[in-house]
Each structure stands twice: as C-alpha cells, then as structure tokens.
Image (cartoon, rainbow, N blue to C red):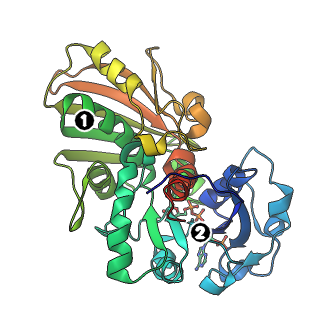
Amino acid sequence: MSLSNPKSPIPVAILGATGTVGQRFIHLLDGHPWFRVVALTGSARRQGQRYGEAVHWLLSEPLPAWAAEMPLLPTEPGSLNGAALAFSALPSDIAREVEPQLAARGVWVCSNASAYRREPDVPILLPEINAGHTAVLRQQQAHRGWKGGIVTNSNCTSSGLSVVLKALDDAFGLESAFVVSMQAISGAGYPGVASLDIVGNVLPYIGGEEAKVEWEPRKILGAVAPEGIRLADFRISAHTNRVPVVNGHTVVASVALKRAPADPEEAIRALEAYQPPEAARGLPSTPRPVIVVRREPDRPQPRLDALTGGGMTTVVGRVRPDPIWDLKFVAVSHNTVRGAAGGAVYNAELLVAQGWV
Ligand SMILES: NC(=O)c1ccc[n+]([C@@H]2O[C@H](COP(=O)([O-])OP(=O)(O)OC[C@H]3O[C@@H](n4cnc5c(N)ncnc54)[C@H](OP(=O)(O)O)[C@@H]3O)[C@@H](O)[C@H]2O)c1
C-alpha cells in the first residue's frame, strides 16, 4: 500500500464531542493540516444546542470559534455531514452500537472506546509500535462486509506502558512485567470521580482497568496472523489506582527480560534510540521523540512531563536494576493526548497515509 498525503482536507466527525476526550479532539484538530471537522455529536439531551453553549470547556487552551458555532448533531450514521472519518469519544456501550453502523456505511472509525478492542480483527493501533497491524483490516472488511472499518486506540494506561515495553522487548526480549499505575482523574471522564472521594486520597480500584492493562499490551505488541492479531508471549501483573492528579498517568514497573542489560545505561540507550516503524515516522502526530528519558532522580512527574512532545511522547525515568527481576523504571504518558484523542488522530493519519481512507 502506497503512502500518501491528502490533496484536500478530509471531512471528519467527532462523536461524543462534549466530553473530556471530545474536547481534546477539538483542540488537536484545530488547524490540523489533513482534517476538517464537519460534524460534532453529543447525547440526545444536547441536540440542537450550539457546541459553545452545550460544552463545559475544561482545557486551558481557548475553545476555537469554529467549534463554538457548530450545532450538536445526533450520534447517528445519517447525521455526519459526509464525514469520511469519525473520531469516537463515546461511552463503550454506545460505541458498541454506533461504530459498526458507521463502518458498514464506509466510514473509518478511530475509536477511544473499549467496545471492540478484544476483537481479533480490530487492531489496537499505536503507530509508533504496530503500524503494520492495519493489515488485519482486510480480514475485518471481508468478515464483516464493511466498506469502512474500526481501529481503536488502547486504554490510556496501556499506551505509554506499551511504548516502553516495545522498546525493551526489541532490545532485550520481554518475559514479564509487574506494573502499578497512578492514574489522573481526567481519565475517568467528566464529571468523573466525586471530589470528596479523590481529594487528598488514593482510590485503589478502577473498574475493569487491571484486566485491560494486563491484556492490551500483549495485543499491541502481537503479530498479524490468519486468525487476526495473535497476542505476544509475555505476562503482565497490574495494580491500577486513581490519584488526585488532573492529567497524566504514571506507571511504575519492574520487568523480567530474556537478556538482562549490562547496566541501566544500556537500557536507557535502547529507550532513547527507539524509532517508529517507517510507515509511522513522518505523520503530523508522530511523537518527536517517541521516548524521552529523564536523568534527574525525581522525574518524570505528571505535572511537569505529561505534555512533553505535545503530550505524544512517553517520558521515562529512574531506570535502574531491579533486585528481584532485571530492571525497573517510571513512565509518564498524557492520558487524554497519547492515551486518547492524540492517539486516535495519529491512527487516522496512518490510515490516510496507507491509503485506507
Ligand atoms: N478520559 C480518558 O483519558 C480516556 C482515555 C482513553 C479512552 N477513553 C474512552 O473514551 C471514551 C470517552 O471518554 P471521556 O473521558 O471523554 O468520557 P466523558 O467525559 O464522559 O464524555 C462522554 C461523551 O459521550 C457523550 N454521550 C454520552 N451518552 C451518549 C449517548 N447515549 N449518545 C451519544 N453520546 C453520548 C457525552 O455527551 P453529553 O455531553 O451529551 O452527555 C460526551 O460527549 C470512553 O469510552 C472512555 O472509556 C477515555
């Protein structure tokens, strides 16, 4: 498949545009060189309202005037004003219903929802890791009779973690990982967790999250096979926690490797040298660089580091020997940028560059 840039802007829709992730999409698509937003959707209670009236805008960047004036449309296939691509920031149960209807009509859906992540013919795409997983879309279209398709991005904790695991797997071979997350409150959407529950507190349970973090990286680092994506052969044990941080998920991890690095410097060099596959390199949202390693003993921190590389870069620090396994480290990734809207925009760029859209 040949790589190509679009000659004229591609019309796109944002589904669930009023939510935490939907707002990030508005910001990231404002002035995007390839995409022009032609439709914004919300739930039935918002319909007919202008976006600027309906949204409780939470970003520090101003709400763009073009978005404020747009009407909120129903989240239905016939209401997307001819969009060729739909960025889905819908709750999972709504996504499960709507996304296949769009794909059947020829729309390419780049979804943040977990609804289809476990389907073997639906890739969990992180182009800097697995741009080649789009090959499974031929199976998806053939099996399901769709003219378009669905690609998903990962759960917001799996994204930064998977980037680091991929770089370590390439260099040393990954056997297993033990991970503990400290996840920002914006990861729960808006209004999300009640302030009385989270201020000055840590919540040691996020429904469904541990299973996602233990499984998704194995699919992301997996391989395209005749039956769909085949899972990579390593194991993860995850503890996931909600902490009173606004943006940026932190993961602390210990890993067992097939070959232990001679010293932490060898691991740091491998992380810093990591490059995306060729197909994912020159796209507008390609993380530049993919991984930054901080040398200070008290970094990365979500408040200081989550927006590195516009929020698309994974920031790693405290790379050191592990007395039980081989190596341990800390990683910070922006949950609504790399872990959600920015990741989906990067996926859409890959689909365009590879000629799917
Ligand atoms: N937040 C993150 O960091 C993150 C990261 C990765 C993935 N995700 C996933 O991304 C999706 C969106 O998350 P979020 O954090 O943005 O959630 P959110 O803040 O709760 O926003 C949900 C959006 O969906 C709309 N919606 C709700 N019910 C609907 C219905 N019946 N029909 C049509 N639209 C409806 C809401 O519109 P109204 O305003 O009209 O209610 C709102 O625009 C979820 O699947 C989530 O799991 C989130």
Instruction: Write down the quadrant of residue 329 in the picture.
Output: top left
Q: Mark 2 points at which residue?
A: 86
Q: Is residue 21 above or below residue 88?
A: above
Whether 193 is drawn above or below 17: the answer is above
- Regarding residue 117, the answer to whether it shows in the image is no
Please state the quadrant of the image where ligand 1 appears: bottom right
The residues bearing labels 2 and 1 have C-alpha atoms spaced at a distance of 33 Å
The type of residue carrying mark 2 is Ala
Find numbered disc 1 in the image and state the secondary structure of the residue it sits on: helix
Horizontal side of residue 185 vs 219, given as left or right: right
Dot label at residue 169: 1
- Asked where in the image residue 138 lies, by quadrant, the reply is bottom left
Residue in view at x 41 percent, y 71 percent: 115
Number of the label disc, if any, that sits on residue 329: none
- Mark 2 Cα within 10 Å, few/some/many (few <14, many 20+)? many
Above or below residue 40? Residue 74 is below
Q: Between residues 340 and 347, which one lies in front from this camera angle?
A: 347
Give the SS element for disc 2: strand
Q: Can residue 73 be seen in this view?
A: yes
For the residue carrying disc 1, how many other residues have a C-alpha within 10 Å: few (<14), some (14-19), or many (20+)?
some
Amino acid beneath label 1: Asp
Q: Residue at x 32, y 33 (%)?
A: 167
**Residue 184, horizontal then vertical, whole percent:** 51, 45
Q: Position of residue 278 (x, y in %)?
A: 43, 40
How many marks overall? 2
| Left or right position of 6 against 61 | left
| Left or right of residue 179, residue 145 in this image | right
Q: Position of residue 316 (x, y in %)?
A: 42, 27
- Marks 2 and 1, the one that precedes in the sequence: 2
Q: Which of 70 and 300 is in front in this view?
A: 70
